[in-house]
Image (spheres, rainbow, N blue to C red):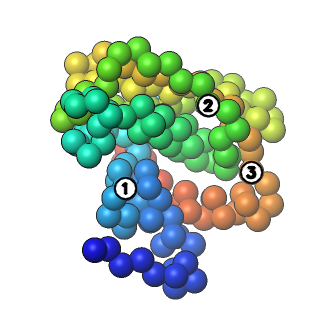
């Protein structure tokens, strides 16, 4: 059984390491590691049996999580600290378990207070299996500082 400690026992960057999608300390997390290339935040993930809905296919909620997380990292990569306000998803095909999936996102338009993002998920053959658009809001004040501290502690570039 995993042991969880009180949040007060961690500093902020350590708390981020418990993120379900990208945290490396979360024993049930996805452990996504994003890299930045030409304005895209990109990660590879192989879904296992415990991630399925129907046998052999990734649960739709998990697909949504992957696309949302990629959008967040696309903003962080641009030095923008933002939170998801709206997410629209389109499933193009069943998403298979047991093979590498590539999730990627980028900023499509910066409107000032809000940002439009696009994200896509492709299977190991490169086929588009899901895509999303998102509206993210710029964080301000203390909230922006918290997000910035966490993101900068985990952000990687192609040279890393």
Secondary element at tag 3: loop
Q: Quadrant of residue 114?
A: top right
Q: Which mark is residue 154?
A: none
The CA distance from mark 2 to mark 1 is: 21 Å
The CA distance from mark 3 to mark 2 is: 17 Å
Choose mark 3 or mark 2, whichever is in front: 2
Q: Which of marks 1 and 3 precedes in the sequence?
A: 1
In the rendered image, the vertical position of residue 30 relative to residue 2, given as above or below: above
Q: Which residue is mark 1?
A: 29
Contact between marks 3 and 1 (CB within 8 A): the answer is no
Q: Which of marks 2 and 3 precedes in the sequence?
A: 2
| Residue at 63% over, 47% down | 79
Choose mark 3 or mark 1, whichever is in front: 1
Secondary element at tag 1: loop
Q: Which of marks 1 and 2 precedes in the sequence?
A: 1
Q: Which residue is mark 3?
A: 139
Percent from the top left, x then y, of residue 118? 56, 25
Q: Which mark is residue 87?
A: 2
Q: Locate residue 139 relative to residue 11 in the image: left or right.
A: right
Percent from the top left, x then y, of residue 91? 44, 19
Q: Dot 2, crowdedness within 10 Å: few (<14), some or many (≥20)?
A: some
Q: Locate residue 132 relative to residue 159 in the image: left or right.
A: right
| Residue at 37% over, 19% down | 129
Percent from the top left, x then y, of residue 133? 59, 24
Q: Nearer the viewer, residue 107 or 89?
A: 89
Percent from the top left, x then y, of residue 122? 34, 23
Q: Dot 3, crowdedness within 10 Å: few (<14), some or many (≥20)?
A: some
Q: Dot 1, crowdedness within 10 Å: few (<14), some or many (≥20)?
A: some
In the rendered image, the vertical position of residue 5 relative to residue 156, given as above or below: below
């Amino acid at each position: 059984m995993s042991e969880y400690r009180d949040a007060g026992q961690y500093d902020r960057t350590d708390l981020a390491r418990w993120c379900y999608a990208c945290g490396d300390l979360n024993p049930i997390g996805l452990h996504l590691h994003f890299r930045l290339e030409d304005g895209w935040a990109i990660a590879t993930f192989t879904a296992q049996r415990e991630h399925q809905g129907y046998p052999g296919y990734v649960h739709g909620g998990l697909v949504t999580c992957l696309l949302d997380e990629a959008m967040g990292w696309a903003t962080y990569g641009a030095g923008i600290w933002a939170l998801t306000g709206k997410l629209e998803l389109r499933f193009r095909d069943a998403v298979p378990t047991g093979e590498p999936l590539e999730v990627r996102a980028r900023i499509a338009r910066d409107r000032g207070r809000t940002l439009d993002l696009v994200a896509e998920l492709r299977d190991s053959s490169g086929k588009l299996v899901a895509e999303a658009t998102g509206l993210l809001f710029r964080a301000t004040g203390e909230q922006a500082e918290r997000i910035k501290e966490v993101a900068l502690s985990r952000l990687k570039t192609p040279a890393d």
